[in-house]
């Protein structure tokens, strides 16, 4: 019998741990980790933050390095890019020559969910040694500058919410919440381009051509504005308040506040406290009474998406909402738990746009599950929290460390040997 398989036919935890570590080490290109060698051969922002948690389980210095390398690419105004092109690789489109941000290192011109603060705090909680204190002192002002950038450029309503200017900023690239807002984006002038994602992966998992044309048009728009973030966020063709980024930023600010208090950064603590205070009320702007949940909202049309996605359930992680709102969201969650084999589908299976294998229209992502599960535990939804963790572990044991998973069958979707999936096993699901 294969040693890695235990009596009941399951892969042993020891084997899974080893496999997960091997994936992180083999995707480590020296100071940063690629999400997947073929599909995503550069450094991605929120991927690196989650990946650091995986490294922290066996090499804490390497964990800090991952986040510090990301912040080495921070722009002067505090912006931290979605992608850092540390070296050339033509396996991905759009590459540095398409973005043309004119920075060194080359980066894309959009950002991604600000989860770094939360992961930094988590690593600090794992080991409060003097050596790690120095890393916090080094990173804290950089993260602060990024959060100030969000405050300055991405909160035009002054409510503590986050406006996304490209679907890729949300990290949920192809979620149906972006369908209507993106449909209004003019694609008549886009130049010819050649996708690379469909060379590596089955078309049925990836966005349709119409979606991709719009993604490209939005990149071309930003480039035409020389990546002037003020203009892009106030006049751009796509401006949607993303419920996911908003909840993650609120949580990140709460984690920053905890660090600021612990490290006596008093002035920062006051500033962060104000952000949190404003956002706790501001989220009402996203509340959709008909659906009974917080939903993304298009600033251009003023319309709520009316869609429950996995991001909806991050309200517990952010710790926001009245008792009534929380009760309503947890009723929605319990309903999905009884009808879905593996939690948390990125879109509810009863939505007509649900597609079990296609990007952000059905599949389960381990990193989102981690945040939802953590939030559920914190608000006392302990059984649901545990169920989400067990489902995540079961998916990985059944199919390996895929990018995402089919919520009905457990089949892997997207890239194989994926860094953040392996990291989530090591730090959370495999424990
Ligand atoms: C896809 C995901 C995004 C992620 C990236 C790299 O674009 O939608 O969230 O950061 O892949 O893993």
Image (cartoon, grey):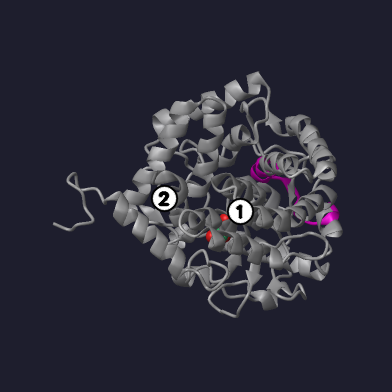
> Pointers 2 and 1 in contact (CB under 8 A)?
no
In the picture, measured across the screen, residue 13 lies left or right of residue 156, that is left
**Labels 2 and 1: the sequence-earlier one:** 1
Does any portion of residue 166 appear in the rendered image?
no
The structure residue drawn at horizontal position 59% and vertical position 72%, both measured from the top left corner, is: 93
The structure residue drawn at horizontal position 61% and vertical position 24%, both measured from the top left corner, is: 326
For disc 2, the marked residue is: 405
Whole-percent x and y of residue 309? 56, 40
Does any portion of residue 13 appear in the rendered image?
yes
Above or below 80: residue 356:
above
Whole-percent x and y of residue 313? 57, 35
For disc 1, the marked residue is: 171
Image quarter of the C terminus: top left
Classify mark 1: residues with Cα within 10 Å, few (<14), some (14-19) or many (20+): many
The structure residue drawn at horizontal position 72% and vertical position 60%, both measured from the top left corner, is: 80
SS for callout 2: strand
Q: Magenta residues, as a range? A: 234-249
Classify mark 2: residues with Cα within 10 Å, few (<14), some (14-19) or many (20+): many
Frontmost residue, 4 versus 121:
121
Of all residues shown, which one is farthest toward the top? 324
- Check residue 48 in the rendering and tell me which mark sits there, or answer none: none
| Residue 240 belongs to the span the image colors magenta | yes
Mark 1 vs ligand 1: CB under 8 Å?
Answer: yes
In the picture, measured across the screen, residue 427 lies left or right of residue 102, that is left
Of all residues shown, which one is farthest toward the left? 1
Above or below 420: residue 198:
below
Whole-percent x and y of residue 367? 52, 48
SS for callout 1: loop
Of all residues shown, which one is farthest toward the front? 130
Image-quarter location of ligand 1: bottom right
Above or below 55: residue 177:
above
């Amino acid at each position: 019998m294969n040693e890695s398989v235990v009596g009941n036919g399951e892969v042993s935890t020891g084997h899974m741990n080893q496999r997960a570590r091997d994936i992180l080490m083999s995707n480590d290109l020296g100071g940063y980790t690629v999400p997947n060698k073929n599909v995503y051969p550069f450094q991605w922002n929120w991927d690196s933050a989650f990946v650091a948690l995986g490294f922290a389980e066996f090499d804490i210095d390497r964990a800090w390095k991952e986040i510090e390398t990301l912040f080495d690419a921070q722009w002067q105004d505090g912006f931290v890019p979605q992608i850092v092109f540390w070296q050339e690789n033509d396996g991905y489109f759009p590459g540095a020559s398409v973005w043309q941000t004119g920075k060194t290192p080359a980066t894309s011109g959009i950002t991604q969910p600000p989860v770094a603060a939360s992961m930094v705090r988590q690593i600090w909680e794992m080991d409060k040694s003097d050596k790690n204190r120095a890393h916090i002192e080094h990173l804290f002002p950089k993260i602060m500058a990024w959060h100030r950038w969000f405050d300055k450029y991405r909160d035009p309503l002054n409510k503590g919410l986050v406006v996304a200017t490209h679907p890729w900023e949300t990290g949920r690239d192809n979620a149906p919440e972006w369908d209507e807002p993106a449909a209004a984006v003019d694609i008549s002038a886009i130049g010819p381009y050649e996708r690379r994602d469909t060379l590596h992966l089955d078309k049925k998992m990836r966005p349709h051509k119409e979606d991709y044309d719009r993604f490209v048009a939005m990149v071309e728009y930003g480039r035409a504005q020389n990546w002037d973030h003020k203009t892009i966020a106030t006049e751009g063709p796509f401006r949607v308040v993303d419920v996911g980024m908003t909840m993650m930023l609120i949580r990140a600010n709460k984690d920053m506040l905890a660090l600021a208090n612990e490290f006596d950064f008093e002035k920062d603590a006051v500033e962060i406290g104000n952000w949190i205070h404003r956002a706790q009320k501001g989220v009402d702007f996203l509340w959709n009474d008909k659906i009974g949940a917080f939903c993304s909202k298009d600033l251009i049309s003023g319309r709520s998406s009316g869609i429950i996605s996995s991001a909806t359930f991050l309200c517990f992680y952010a710790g926001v909402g009245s008792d009534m709102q929380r009760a309503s969201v947890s009723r929605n969650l319990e309903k999905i738990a009884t009808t879905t084999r593996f939690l948390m589908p990125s879109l509810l299976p009863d939505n007509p746009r649900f597609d079990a294998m296609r990007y952000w229209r059905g599949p389960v992502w381990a990193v989102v599950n981690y945040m939802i599960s953590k939030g559920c535990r914190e608000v006392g939804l302990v059984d649901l929290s545990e169920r989400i963790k067990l489902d995540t572990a079961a998916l990985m044991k059944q199919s390996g460390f895929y990018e995402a998973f089919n919520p009905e069958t457990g089949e892997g979707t997207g890239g194989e040997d994926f860094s953040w999936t392996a990291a989530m096993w090591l730090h959370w699901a495999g424990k």
